[in-house]
Image (tube, coloured by chain):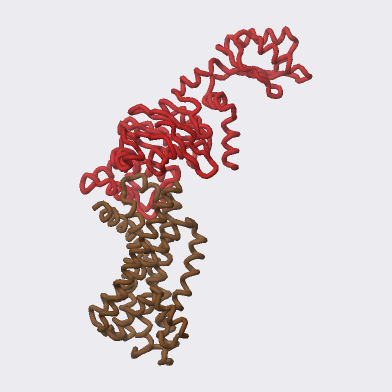
Chain colours: A brown, B red
């Protein structure tokens, strides 16, 4: 199928560009490392924050994987803006390339990046003595959830990028959603110690769905029903936000 | 293409553009920025849909069968479209794959093109390090990967230095023959249209105002331009104009400060007699020049506006 084939080649293009700047992946990882090492130490003496986890780092690690994926996804639209500005998109549009592949490749690339970063964070966690209680399936859950969370937000981010087509506005939009969604989740503290209203709101936060699923795999292991439910929710939402991005892409085409 | 119309909000970008390009020719669309050249190209390359009218490219209707048209065309957009983080070769390989080319056929074609546009040595370097001229040549190679029948070159030399521009003209001319292409070229450089185009159309405010070979258009002006510079301007300019106007064969006479301009069938022959009659009228002449009509004159003639002035106005707006 043309969509699959074209998307594949476009993902290859983006992955190669990313590999050409490994410094970029490193930079994206420094922030989660700081969170993990610094905050892991800072809050380690407050047991009420970490739920049933044996250490705060164990509690924090799956949250940081999701936070990293979430931030990566939020910024995914920047690559689209750069391609729009440099008329790479227009060049593809004059070819028989699948229109869908131009958008989908951006979303999938974001998912791939998040998976690689999740893997590195898992390794760092291992070095800090974090054991994934669900074992190998747990590792897979963390990687898949990382990819899905990134793709959910990459869909929204690309949609916004195609609407605003301007880097400054894009940065403002990403910052606007970034921090609130992070604090309205159980990335840093368990849901039970949140104010009641926050805890209720967080139930509808896709970032939190990801955190709950990956934390279950790392800290508890075995609530496969709940993990599966969150995975399906994220999968459905990925489809929805990708459709949003595709719709805004049609609007861009009409504006030409 | 017939009666193409396209409106962007308040701006009627295309107001009934109609023209036909013959197989294997280089056709130039000439006009100032904002005249509708690029919009025309965007319609023909299926990037945008016209509000009205229809267009065939290599026999395919661009609205009804866009993918068939896309396979037959190569598009070199005004502002590049290269992936700067990839190498020249990687750019070309991806482009070829999008057109469904594979394996050794694609690899051979890419190497051939790199050679053809003189980038063989730079093929595996990242595009960010390319000069403007090199990027432009890669742009053209990108448009040629799948051996299209028709190539669209939108402002191919804008932003290049004069040396690179001339090199590009030679290149385009050679490619047109080697790859037996039909080329549709847009430009706002009169010189460029004169150099490259077999036939051309002048576009102004979304309409084609005239169409023909550069020679035909110049001949259509009938005659050479004679400019008489008056020695003194003590109220005799109108007298001078009257003398020139009554000269046999003189057309389109006008005055601009100390200069009286007119068109005569043969400038060299007319000058002695013209000078004599001015002398008889007691008018002193500082200098006389004749010029064969240039595309500049053609443009001025058909649009009633100076090309350069119009261009600046369009940029300012």
Q: State the quadrant of the N terminus of chain B.
A: top left
- Which residue is painted at 68% across and 21% down in the image? B255
Q: State the quadrant of the C terminus of chain B.
A: top right
Answer with the quarter of the image where residue A192 lies.
bottom left
Answer with the quarter of the image where residue A111 lies.
bottom left
Can residue A192 be seen here?
yes
Q: Is residue B7 above or below residue A33?
A: above
Q: Is residue A76 above or below residue B276?
A: below
Hey, which residue is sitting farthest right in the picture?
B234
**In the displayed structure, does residue B188 sit left or right of residue B94?**
right
**Residue B67 placement (x, y as % from top left):** 31, 43
Answer with the quarter of the image where residue A218 lies.
bottom left
Q: Is residue A172 above or below residue A100?
A: below
Counting every numbered tag in the picture gives: 0
**Residue A127 placement (x, y as % from top left):** 32, 83
Can residue B164 be seen here?
no
**Residue A91 placement (x, y as % from top left):** 38, 47
**In the displayed structure, does residue B189 sit left or right of residue B57?**
right
**Residue A238 placement (x, y as % from top left):** 34, 66
**In the displayed structure, does residue B247 sit left or right of residue B138?**
right
Depth order, front residue of B222/A93: A93
Depth order, front residue of A59/B265: A59
- Which residue is painted at 30% across and 38% down in the image? B72
Depth order, front residue of A180/B121: A180
Depth order, front residue of B258/B8: B8
């Amino acid at each position: 199928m043309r969509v699959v084939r074209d998307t594949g080649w476009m993902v290859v293009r983006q992955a190669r560009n990313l590999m050409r700047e490994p410094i970029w992946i490193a930079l994206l990882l420094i922030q989660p490392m700081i969170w993990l090492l610094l905050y892991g130490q800072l809050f380690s003496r407050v047991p009420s924050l970490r739920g049933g986890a044996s250490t705060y780092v164990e509690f924090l690690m799956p949250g940081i994987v999701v936070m990293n994926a979430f931030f990566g996804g939020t910024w995914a639209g920047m690559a689209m803006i750069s391609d729009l500005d440099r008329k790479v998109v227009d060049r593809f549009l004059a070819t028989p390339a699948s229109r869908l592949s131009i958008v989908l490749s951006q979303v999938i690339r974001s998912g791939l990046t998040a998976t690689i970063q999740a893997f590195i964070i898992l390794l760092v966690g291992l070095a800090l003595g974090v054991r994934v209680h669900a074992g190998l399936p747990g590792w897979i859950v963390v990687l898949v959830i990382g990819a899905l969370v990134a793709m959910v937000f990459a869909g929204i981010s690309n949609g916004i990028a195609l609407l605003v087509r301007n880097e400054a506005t894009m940065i403002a939009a990403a910052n606007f959603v970034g921090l609130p969604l992070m604090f309205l989740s159980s990335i840093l503290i368990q849901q039970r110690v949140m104010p009641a209203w926050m805890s209720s709101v967080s139930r509808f936060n896709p970032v939190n769905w990801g955190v709950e699923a990956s934390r279950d795999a790392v800290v508890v292991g075995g609530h496969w029903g709940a993990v599966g439910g969150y995975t399906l929710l994220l999968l459905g939402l990925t489809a929805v936000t990708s459709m949003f991005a595709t719709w805004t892409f049609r609007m861009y085409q009409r504006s030409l | 293409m017939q009666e193409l119309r396209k409106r962007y909000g308040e701006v009627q970008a295309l107001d009934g553009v109609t023209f036909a390009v013959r197989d294997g020719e280089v056709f130039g669309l000439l006009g100032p920025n904002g005249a509708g050249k690029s919009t025309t190209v965007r319609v023909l390359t299926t990037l945008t849909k016209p509000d009205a009218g229809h267009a065939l490219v290599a026999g395919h209707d661009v609205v009804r069968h866009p993918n068939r048209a896309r396979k037959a065309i190569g598009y070199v957009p005004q502002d590049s479209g290269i992936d700067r983080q990839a190498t020249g070769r990687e750019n070309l390989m991806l482009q070829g794959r999008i057109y469904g080319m594979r394996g050794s056929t694609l690899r051979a074609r890419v190497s051939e093109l790199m050679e053809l546009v003189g980038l063989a040595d730079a093929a595996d370097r990242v595009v960010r390090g390319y000069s403007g001229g090199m990027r432009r040549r890669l742009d053209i190679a990108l448009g040629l990967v799948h051996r299209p029948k028709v190539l669209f070159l939108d402002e191919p030399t804008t932003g290049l230095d004069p040396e690179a521009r001339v090199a590009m003209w030679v290149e385009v001319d050679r490619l047109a023959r080697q790859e037996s292409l039909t080329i549709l070229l847009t430009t706002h450089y009169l010189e460029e249209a004169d150099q490259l185009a077999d036939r051309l159309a002048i576009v102004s405010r979304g309409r084609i105002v005239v169409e023909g070979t550069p020679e035909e258009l110049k001949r259509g002006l009938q005659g050479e331009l004679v400019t008489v510079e008056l020695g003194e301007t003590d109220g005799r300019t109108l007298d001078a104009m009257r003398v020139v106007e009554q000269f046999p064969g003189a057309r389109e006479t006008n005055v601009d400060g100390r200069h009286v301009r007119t068109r005569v069938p043969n400038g060299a022959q007319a000058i002695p007699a013209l000078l004599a009659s001015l002398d008889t009228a007691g008018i002193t002449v500082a200098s006389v020049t004749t010029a064969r009509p240039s595309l500049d004159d053609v443009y001025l003639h058909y649009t009633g506006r100076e090309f350069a002035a119009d261009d600046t106005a369009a940029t300012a707006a």
